[in-house]
Amino acid sequence: GGLTREWYLTLSKQMLNPDKALFIHMSNGLTYQPNPSSHIQPDHLKYFKFAGQVVGKALWDEQLLDAHFTLSMYKHLLNLPIGYQDVEAVDPDFFRNLKWMLDNDISDVLDETFSIVRNQFGEMLTVDLKPNGRNIPVTEDNKAEYVQLVAEQHLTTAIRDQIDAFKQGFQDLMPPELINIFTCSELELLMCGLPSIDVEDLKANTEYSGYTRESVQIKWYWSFVHSLNQEDLARLVQFVTGTSQVPMEGFKALKGMNGPQRFNIHRCGDSRRLPSSHTCFNQLDLPEYSSEEQLHKLLLTACREGFQGFGFS
């Protein structure tokens, strides 16, 4: 009943309370990731196990939680591989640096080794990404390995104990064979429910670049959005912003990597390709399609197939 629902919602909010030092808020202001410094909290791993048990019990009881995690966290729960693209939801600036490394020749440009420097309560610690990593230079030939290892360090290695404790508690009540059939987005919807998305609020708080409100593609776009059911609306919002959750204050309160950042549509890309998105900017890149039918078909495909990862970003 209502008391049970309220109990789960209250418990999930306290679980994510920054004063508990267990989870940290991401730059989008909506999703959470385990805090690598959670050990300042005595018995923090016991709390992570309990948090996992709460999430697992809520799923079993078909109760919703006010707890949206990062994509990489859902991947850990589903035993899916982590890629460097998943860094975008945690640290957009760092993700852009990694992507630049992959896209450009770094010969005689960067002076990096297979190690990182981490600030731990004022003390700078050097962490090797592989044995003797601090003495192994990053080159054009091995940069892909470096990018993957540094992504794993941020998303897995630095919080391995916290993730393992959370997964242990979660799997105590929700065995892997029961949830591995789901995608990351489906798991989020099971945990947090389908958001109620106000299309008029979204429309009133959308900005345009290269298009105007009167552009024919934008009229087709809003015709498409109005035709969607709540499930596909959630997928659209998740495809563009990284999460299906809408801020309590509505779309005017959306945040990006640099603070407030409204939903925005850019005229960009090849009209023979699917729309793409940049979740750290809440940005939809919408090609200048030549027909309403083409726009509807390709945008729906992108929303349904690309909302759970970065394949279309």
Image: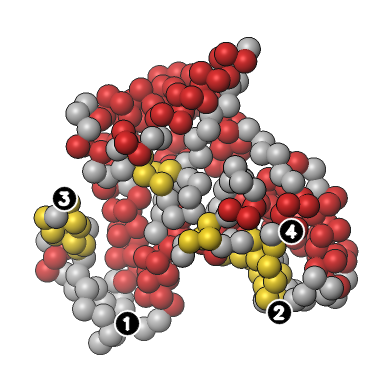
* Numbered-mark total: 4
Q: Amino acid at mark 3?
A: Phe
Q: CA distance from mark 4 to mark 1?
A: 43 Å
Front-lying residue, 58 or 305: 58
Give the mark nearer the N terminus: 4 vs 1: 1
**Can residue 262 be seen in the rendering of this structure?**
yes
Q: Which residue is mark 3?
A: 121
Q: Residue furthest bottom?
A: 108
Say which of marks 4 and 1 sits in front: 4
Classify 10 Å Cα crowding around label 4: few (below 14), some (14-19), many (20 and above).
Answer: few
Q: CA distance from mark 2 to mark 4?
A: 18 Å
Q: Amino acid at mark 2?
A: Gly
- The location of residue 309, given as percent across then percent down, is 55, 53
Against 215, residue 145 (above or below) is above
Against 169, residue 186 (above or below) is below
**Can residue 81 be seen in the rendering of this structure?**
no
Q: Amino acid at mark 4?
A: Ala
Marks 2 and 4 in Cβ contact (< 8 Å): no
